[in-house]
Amino acid sequence: MRKFVAPGLALGLFVDLVMALVFAFGLGGSARALGSPPAGVSQATLVVYPQSGWKAWEVGGAAVPAIWLHGYGSNAREWFPFVETIRLPRGGRFIFPEGIEATVPPHGPANGRAWWQLELDSYVAPGVNAPDMSSSRPVGLGRASAGLLVFVREMQKRLRTPASGGIILGGFSQGAMVASETAFRSDVRLRALVLLSGTIVDEPSWTGSMAKRRGLPVFIAHGRKDGILPFAASQRLADRMRQSGLAVTFVPFDGGHEIPADVVVKLNDFLARI
């Protein structure tokens, strides 16, 4: 494992949950890592981006970024096992950003990360047992998406990836919401969009902007027994995207709020075609 500090970061100290990394002073400083990364990710690099304030684990030496946003209460390292199972297109590099906020009990684990404080129960109407975010616009969603755009520009500059080349943008659960918001409400160049167990948020705004993504390959998967975010909302999101001309691959499965192996197999088939 290596540690890379993006240009512009001053001398300082960063403490992670399972390891301490001491920053080197100066441009492109390196650091000594205390501890070991999980099996299969010995080449993982933790990169800190000073302009956005984001940090991300990167795996692979290629220059075509595939960004994967984790779910609420999780963290970037939860993606590490998928390095061994998800097959990126030739030239792909795994990018796993860390959520920009800490989750706070009782709304999440004390050591979890989030893109904003979700408070999912506030979207459950009386007499209903599933949240509906289709008519809401959380302030934190726009803030997370704006930060992602700054991060993408920093990352492309560091990797010397042309902005015109496009990125693969994916997310799970809350991460899928941020990915969707960024896809539908920005002009960032995308090669593909991957939405895993997400939901539809601010439906009028999203659907009103989908047509500009006409032809974009989209992979969307959701469990029929999901007890966190309703299956029907993802199904409706898939329908809205199809109606707007996006090239949607919708994969329903008999499971819950998860990413099962058969979904990964179908995701790999999708990635092989883009």
Image: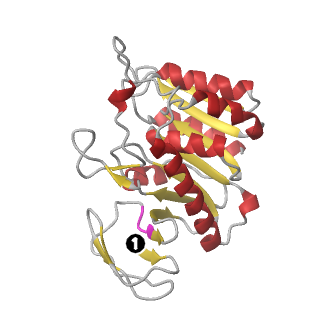
As rendered, which of 58 and 73 lies closer to the eye?
73
In which quadrant of the rendered image does the N terminus lie?
Answer: bottom left
Report the number of discs.
Answer: 1
Residue beneath disc 1: 1
In which quadrant of the rendered image does the C terminus lie?
Answer: top right
As rendered, which of 129 and 195 lies closer to the eye?
129
Placement of 85 over or under 29, stated as above or below: above
Q: Position of residue 145 (x, y in %)?
A: 54, 50
Q: Position of residue 177 (x, y in %)?
A: 51, 39
Residue appearing at x 58%, y 66% in the figure = 155
Which quadrant of the view contains residue 160?
bottom right
As rendered, which of 55 and 257 lies closer to the eye?
55
Q: Position of residue 127 (x, y in %)?
A: 34, 11
Check disc 1 and report its element: helix, strand or loop. Answer: loop
Q: The magenta stretch spans which residues? A: 41-46
Residue appearing at x 51%, y 40% in the figure = 176
Which quadrant of the view contains residue 62?
bottom right
Examine the rendering and report whether any part of residue 73 can be seen: yes
Q: Is residue 253 magenta?
A: no
